[in-house]
Image (cartoon, grey):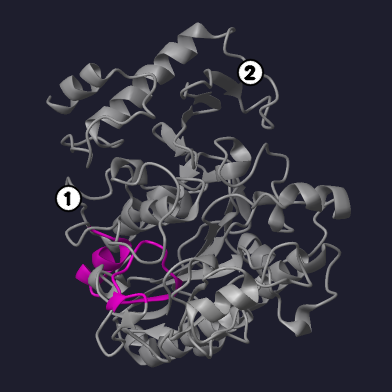
Amino acid sequence: MTEKPNVIVIFTDDQGYGDASCLNPDAKFQTPNLDRLSAEGIAFTNGHCSDTVCTPSRYGLLTGRYSWRTLKKQGVFPAEVPCLITDERMTLASMFGANGYDTAMVGKWHLGMNFPGEVDNRDWRQPVTDMPLDKGFDYFYGIPASLNYGILAWFEGRYARVPPTVYTAKKPNNRHMDYRIMPPYENTPEETLEALGTMGMEVAPDFIDNECLTRFTDKAIEWMQGKEASAKSGKPFFLYLPFTSPHYPVCPREEFWNQGDCGGYGEFMIETDHHVGRVLDYLEQSGLDDNTIVVYASDNGPENSWRGRIEEFGHHSNGIYRGGKRDIYEGGHRVPFFMRWPKGIQNPGRKCDDLVGLVDLMATFAEVVGAELPADAGEDSQSFAKILSDSDTPHERLPLINHGAGGRFAITEGTWKLIMAHKDEPLELYDLANDPGETKNAIGDHPEIVADLSDKITRIVCNGRTTPGENQANDTDYWDDLTWISSEDYQERQLR
């Protein structure tokens, strides 16, 4: 295709596989715009995030490389820390930019930033560094991390529109069992301690949690409107739009209250779906719809409140799958994953059960725009572009690695999933074709599969890449989560 498509990646936060009504016939709320993406594109029903919490999953999405190859082996980052993506690392944004695209990020970053000064001694006249504008994006509007980490303000470019000069902490939420980040705010950490029992976090006087989705969608559409003429004249755009929902705080705007049958969480998902519809409406009204790829996915499975929703509402955020956020089981990393591209998808409205990962977007988009990835980029990314243009050709994914928040590994090839031993946790083997809920550990029944998958995950970890090509070094030496590999074996393989 000679005319390069515009690309929009909408990334939700803690949304489970069962939180899209087209994937869950028993959902207690409807998501008509997500259903539209599925009906007019492809629903990847075997699509996986690369990790089961925010920071590493976002790293995998944007780089095509597993985050556990970096210094971040477990958990997530705070708001203020050197960015996990190094300046020399290719990202989706820098790849698109090198191929003639305008690029923007609007929403939640959560990969680390450097802020001027320290708490109680900030100089907000100075720029924020080591942030999206240093990783290939031309434009940034958003927040640094999850709302419970602070330094909350509406950042545009390298500066906060209104600096985060006051303080707050979590407050009661009357629509969910979590918390709110909302005024009134205190002037000092000491006042916050007296009012809320903790020293609190930095926040801008004009910040309020339930404005995130509206502001992010407004800014995304505003930015696309500014690029509309150039997009029509041959300079496409790439927009990364990571929403903050349905991650805590679950804070739907009042106009969405009492919609659906799943309490505040359902209301928040309905609001999220509404903003997806706003993006789709803009594309249609602007005439950009036909040659714009819209990808929609979640960074990991649902937060622990998924259990309560089953009991109270009969809604399964994780669908038929086991576990949720942080877990190595399918509910932790099998996520809603849709792609719509009217001009480029053959036979839209289909479901694809082939194994794919969000880490694969780098290679897929590179193939779509005719770019060749260097040896040190997208090392774990395998293109599935042929699925878009040829609905009859099966896609055979190289073994896909998943990773839990606590550092545990799993490898899936075809329908077999091997969860690796991790400290005191033993090996587990599941036949996902016959046991998608991972209820029967078949570890003793198929020793040949266990041996084969163990060998493959060892090679993928130690070679620094999944795909064919020159071996690459991981960013660290051996680490303790590699329970099944000896330190000596790791070092020997790294030197090859």
Residue 441 circle label: 2
Q: Position of residue 45 (x, y in %)?
A: 60, 46
Looking at the rendered structure, the number of numbered marks drawn on it comes to 2
**429 left or right, relative to 104:** right
Residue 101 visible within the image: no
Q: Secondary structure at mark 1?
A: loop
Q: Which residue is under mark 1? A: 374
Q: Nearer the viewer, residue 30 or 202?
A: 202
**75 left or right, relative to 270:** left
**79 left or right, relative to 37:** left
Vertically, is 453 above or below 76? above
The residue drawn where x is 45% and y is 63% is 344
The answer to if 102 sits in the magenta stretch is yes
Q: Which residue range is magenta in the image?
A: 90-119
Q: CA distance from mark 1 to mark 2?
A: 40 Å
Q: Nearer the viewer, residue 478 or 364?
A: 478
Residue 198 circle label: none
User: Considering the image in quadrants, where does the C terminus appear?
Assistant: top left
Label 1 CA crowd tier, 10 Å (few <14, some 14–19, many 20+): few
Tell me where residue 79 sits by quadrant: bottom left
User: Considering the image in quadrants, where does the N terminus appear?
Assistant: bottom left
Label 2 CA crowd tier, 10 Å (few <14, some 14–19, many 20+): some
Tell me where residue 178 sits by quadrant: bottom right
Q: What amino acid is found at the position of numbered circle 1 in the picture?
A: Pro
Vertically, is 295 above or below 388? below
Q: Position of residue 211 (x, y in %)?
A: 60, 83
Residue at the far left in the pictured view: 495
Q: What amino acid is found at the position of numbered circle 2 in the picture?
A: Asn
The residue drawn where x is 71% and y is 81% is 253
Nearer the observer: mark 1 or 2; the answer is 2
Q: Secondary structure at mark 2?
A: loop
**253 left or right, relative to 427:** right
